[in-house]
């Protein structure tokens, strides 16, 4: 199961993989924006630890992790 979340000109691609009944492992990848050179070769998928998670929780933490990574790269918004 995949979901795409846009944030500050970037795309956060979230992918869930079934791990158990109603539980999922989750990875995310950041793509896009004119600032893509900031990410360089690190645009790999990142697996979130301490899973598996419920579907709802997996999407939420992947979105927050992706947004935090983008905020770290670009700095705070004013």
Image (tube, grey):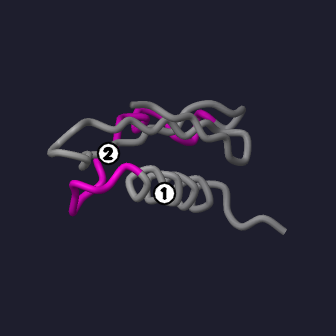
Of residues 18 and 43, the one nearer the viewer is 18
Using the numbered discs, state the Cα–Cα distance from disc 1 to disc 2 in whole angstroms: 10 Å
Q: Label 1 neighbourhood size at 10 Å, few (<14), some (14-19), many (20+)?
A: few
> Which residue sits furthest left?
20
Residue corresponding to mark 2 = 26
| Residue depicted at 52% across the width and 52% down the height | 63
In the image, 65: left or right of 76?
left
Is label 2 in a helix, a strand or a loop?
Answer: strand
| Label number found at residue 60 | 1
Pointer 1 or 2: first along the chain: 2
Quarter holding the C terminus?
bottom right
Which element is circle 1 on? Answer: helix
Name the foreground residue: 52 vs 31. 52
**As displayed, is residue 45 above or below residue 22?**
above
Task: Tell me where the magenta segment starts and ends, as one range.
Answer: 36-55
Is 42 located above or below residue 73 in the figure?
Answer: above
62 in the magenta segment: no
User: Residue 57: horizontal and vertical position, in percent?
Assistant: 40, 59
- 77 or 59: which is nearer to us? 59
Could you tell whether 25 is left or right of 71 in the image? left
Tell me where residue 29 appears, x and y as whole percent.
44, 38
Q: Residue at x 41, y 32 (%)?
A: 41
Q: Position of residue 75 (x, y in %)?
A: 67, 63
Indicate whether residue 49 is drawn in magenta: yes
Q: Estimate the x, y position of residue 21 in percent, counting from the top left.
A: 18, 45
Counting the numbered discs, the total is 2
The disc at residue 41 is none
């Amino acid at each position: 199961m995949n979901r795409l979340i846009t944030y500050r000109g970037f795309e956060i691609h979230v992918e869930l993989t079934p791990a158990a009944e109603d539980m999922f492992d989750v990875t995310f990848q950041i793509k896009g924006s004119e600032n893509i050179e900031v990410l360089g070769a690190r645009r790999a998928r990142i697996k979130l630890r301490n899973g598996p998670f419920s579907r709802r929780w997996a999407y939420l933490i992947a979105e927050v992790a992706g947004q935090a990574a983008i905020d770290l790269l670009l700095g705070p918004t004013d």
